[in-house]
Image (cartoon, grey):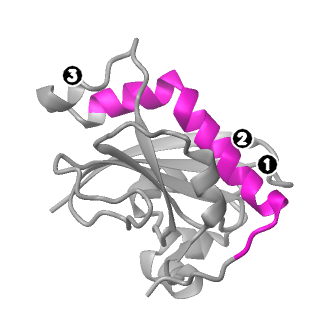
Amino acid sequence: MICQCCVYSQQEINPYITAYRYIDTSLNVKEEMLKSFFDKRINKKVNKDSFINLLLCKQISYMNLSSFEKILSDSTIALGIEKTDASSRQAFYNKYYFKPFNLEELANLNTNKLPSNFYLFFSKLIGRVIIAEINYNSSNSYNKNNCSTPLFGKSVKILFVFNADITRIEKIFFSSIIRN
C-alpha cells in the first residue's frame, strides 16, 4: 500500500532536485549505463553523444546499501548513518525501512513526454544519503505515474552522499546489479 498523504517542504525536495539534475546531465551516468546495460539493443539507446530519456517515477521506495557494502567498508565517508547500521543489511532494514509513498513534487521535475525503457527511482533521504536506481525495462510495462521499484532486470544504482546541510553533493558512487 502506498501512502498518498506525504507532503514535503521545498528544502526537503531540494536533494531530489539536485540528484535528478546530476543524473539527467552527467556523462558519468551515461558511461555507467553503457557498462551496466551491455546488451546491444540497449546500447543502441545509450551512447555518449545522445540524450538519455529517463522516466522519473514519483514513488519513493526503500533501497538498502548492500550493493555499496565494499565501497562503504573501505571508506571513512560520513553518511549521517551509524556505521553498524550501514554495514549490516538487517540492522539497516530494521532501522530505516519504510513503506513506499508517492512524492508528488517529483512529477513536476519530469517534463519528459517521450516513451522510454529507462526508469529512475529514488529512495528516501536517510542521514546524508539518497539512493537512485536506473532500471531498464524492455517491456515498457511501467506507468510513469504509478511505477514501483522493479523486482527483475538490470539496474544502475547511484549513492549520493550530501554535505552536512544537505545542499550539495559531496560524493557519488555507482553500482550495477541484476535481479533474478
Secondary structure found at label 3:
loop
Please give the name of the residue rendered at 37% of the width and 65% of the height, measured from the top-left corner: 149
Task: Give the residue type at disc 3.
Answer: Lys
Give SS at disc 1.
loop
Q: Is residue 26 visible?
A: yes
State if disc 3 and disc 1 touch (CB < 8 Å): no
Dot 1 corresponds to which residue? Answer: 163
**Cβ atoms under marks 2 and 1 closer than 8 Å:** yes
Identity, as a three-letter code, of the amino acid under mark 1: Asn
Between disc 3 and disc 2, the foreground one is 3
Which span is picked out in magenta? 7-35
Above or below, 105 relative to 158: below
Give me the disc on residue 170.
2
In the rendered view, does 68 fall on the left or right side of 44? right
Does the image show residue 77? no
Q: Is residue 5 magenta?
A: no
The residue that disc 3 covers is 44
